[in-house]
């Protein structure tokens, strides 16, 4: 089917060329034909932070900055294997290898790992995380979508969590793309230092001063509260790739992070009860800059005009 469309397209171009030749006795020396290789190419690797099935090209170094705090460097070691490393200022660093494989036309599989850690914090406050993920990408290098599942282990959560990831890229016009990513997870989390009444054998609160039952406060204990929570991260950007230098791009959009659920109850010394909910929402602008250092794509091949003598 693709060959058939290619032949139709070729005949269409040849027909237009013949019409132009008939109208003119001579063909100009310089013909305003567009070299398809001049088309700015979508810079591979990430959508915004999520990896797609199209890796950074072999022997190509790429730098990315997100909102001034995330500094990421990606390098294509092999055709389908790349590694990324970065810093989230001022405290965190990560390493992220990735392998992709084309399994059918327009279809790619991707597996990878993200290992993150704190840089300067003490062991009690240090952050450690590891997420192994696998995904499937469908489409061309310009227009594609990826679905992936990640298995996250971190010392900030009491148990491992499964992450659903969705990402996509859509070409709007030459050098302009819209792209986005979506992460969602449901699991357990803990809240430290939740105040609860100390209870006696019959389940009643214990007084600090039993001799003063009307004025004495309750004895309190502070516990770690387990709760269920939902986590959502989404980022939508418009990516602008320079028509003069396709190794550089700027992206502008909106990032959204939310953590909700985990309703729990905190009890006070004088019988008061507070019903709390662990809710956190953070919308903010999303600005990315990407610079590809070294471009090892095949060289551009100029399209030469074909002269056909009609004998007119």
Image (cartoon, rainbow, N blue to C red):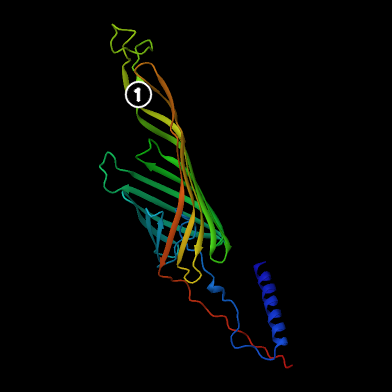
Name the residue at 45% across, 68% down. 247
Secondary structure at numbered mark 1: strand
The percent coordinates of residue 294 (x first, y second) are 40, 70
Q: Quadrant of residue 104?
A: bottom right
Q: Between 250 and 62, which is closer to the camera in this rendering? A: 250
Residue 34 in view here: yes
Query: Taking 216 as reference, is 33 above or below it?
Result: below
- Residue lying farthest to the right in this orientation: 312
Please say if 32 is above or below 105: below
Q: Residue at x 59, y 76 (%)?
A: 34
Pick the front one: 109 or 20: 20
Which residue occupies the foreground of this view, 57 or 13? 13
Residue 276 in the image, given as x and y percentages of width and height = 43, 28
* Quarter that holds the N terminus: bottom right
Q: The C terminus lies in which quarter of the figure?
A: bottom right
Q: Which residue is mark 1?
A: 195
Residue 122 is situated, as x and y percent measured from the top left of the image, at 25, 42
Asked whether residue 138 appears in the rendered view, the answer is no
Residue 180 at what x, y percent from top left?
52, 53
């Amino acid at each position: 089917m693709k060959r058939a469309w290619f032949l139709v397209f070729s005949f269409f171009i040849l027909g237009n060329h013949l019409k132009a030749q008939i109208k003119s006795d001579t063909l100009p020396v310089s013909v305003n034909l567009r070299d398809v290789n001049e088309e700015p190419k979508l810079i591979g690797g990430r959508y915004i932070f999520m990896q797609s099935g199209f890796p950074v090209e072999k022997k190509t170094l790429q730098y990315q900055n997100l909102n001034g705090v995330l500094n990421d460097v990606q390098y294509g070691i092999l055709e389908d294997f790349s590694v990324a490393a970065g810093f989230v200022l001022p405290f965190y660093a990560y390493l992220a290898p990735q392998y992709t494989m084309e399994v059918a036309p327009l279809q790619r599989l991707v597996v990878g790992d993200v290992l993150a850690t704190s840089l300067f914090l003490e062991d009690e406050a240090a952050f450690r995380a590891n997420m192994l993920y696998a995904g499937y990408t469908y489409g061309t290098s310009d227009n594609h979508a990826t679905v992936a599942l990640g298995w996250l282990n971190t010392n900030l959560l009491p148990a491992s969590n499964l992450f659903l990831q969705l990402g996509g890229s859509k070409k709007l016009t030459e050098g302009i793309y819209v792209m986005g990513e979506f992460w969602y997870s449901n699991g357990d989390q803990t809240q430290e230092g939740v105040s609860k009444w100390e209870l006696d054998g019959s389940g009643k609160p214990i007084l600090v001063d039993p001799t003063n039952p009307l004025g004495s406060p309750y004895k309190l204990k502070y516990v770690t509260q387990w709760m269920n929570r939902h986590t959502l991260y989404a980022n939508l950007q418009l990516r602008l790739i320079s028509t003069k230098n396709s190794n550089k791009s700027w992206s502008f959009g909106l990032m959204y992070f939310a953590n909700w659920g985990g309703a729990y109850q905190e009890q006070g010394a004088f019988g008061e009860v507070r019903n709390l909910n662990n809710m956190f929402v953070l919308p903010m602008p999303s600005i990315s800059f990407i610079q590809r250092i070294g471009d090892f794509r095949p060289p551009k091949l100029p399209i030469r005009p074909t002269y056909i003598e009609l004998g007119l």
